[in-house]
Image: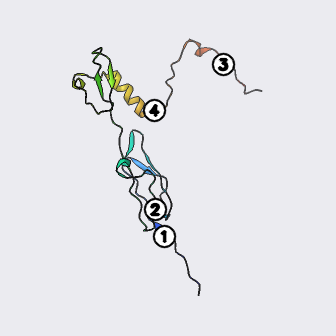
Amino acid sequence: RGRVCVPIMCNTYASPLHGSVDTSLPVRAGTLVTITCDQGYVADGTASGASQTPLCLDSGEFERGVTCVATPCPCCEQSSETKSTPKCTSEGGGGKDVASFVATPKEIRQWEDEVEHPHVFNYVPNVFDHEPRPTTWGT
C-alpha cells in the first residue's frame, strides 16, 4: 500500500488586540501570515524578536508575532533658543522644559487628525469653485 503524506498545519493565527491577520484559516508549515495594526496603532515587539509576518513552523506552531500598541503622542519641549517654539524629541521627553510646555487645543486636534487621517488632503473651497470645470466626458 502507498504512503500518504499529511501536511503539517498551524491553527488559525489569533488576531492581536487592535489588529488583524490576513487569513482566518489554518495554514501549512512554511507559510507567513501578515499582522496589520488598526489605524492609530503601531506594531510593537520587533526589537525583542517578534515578527510582523510570523511563520508557521514545522512544529505546527507560529513564530511570535507583534502586538499592536497605541501610536505614541508627540513629546514636545520648549526650544532653549526662543523659549516659545516647541520642538519634538525622540528621547521620550528628556528635556528639562517639557513639563512647562502645554499644547494648545488646536495643536492637539491637528495631531489627532494626522493620526486618524494620515494622508487625507485638507481641501478648502475657494472663490473659483462656482465656475464650471472643463470635462472630457463627452469626447
Cβ–Cβ under 8 Å for marks 2 and 3: no
Q: Is residue 70 above or below residue 118?
A: below
Label 2 Cα neighbours within 10 Å, binned few <14 / some 14-19 / many ≥20: many
User: Which mark is drawn over residue 8?
Assistant: 1
Callout 2, which amino acid?
Cys
Residue for badge 4: 118
Quarter of the image that includes the N terminus: bottom right
Residue for badge 2: 56
**Based on the displayed image, in which of its 4 quarters is residue 127 positioned?**
top right
- The location of residue 86, given as percent across then percent down, is 32, 21
Disc 3 on helix, strand or loop? loop
Residue for badge 3: 133
Residue located at (35% from left, 23% from top) = 107
Residue located at (37% from left, 30% from top) = 112
Q: Nearer the viewer, residue 134 or 49?
A: 49
Give the number of the mark in front: 2 or 3.
2
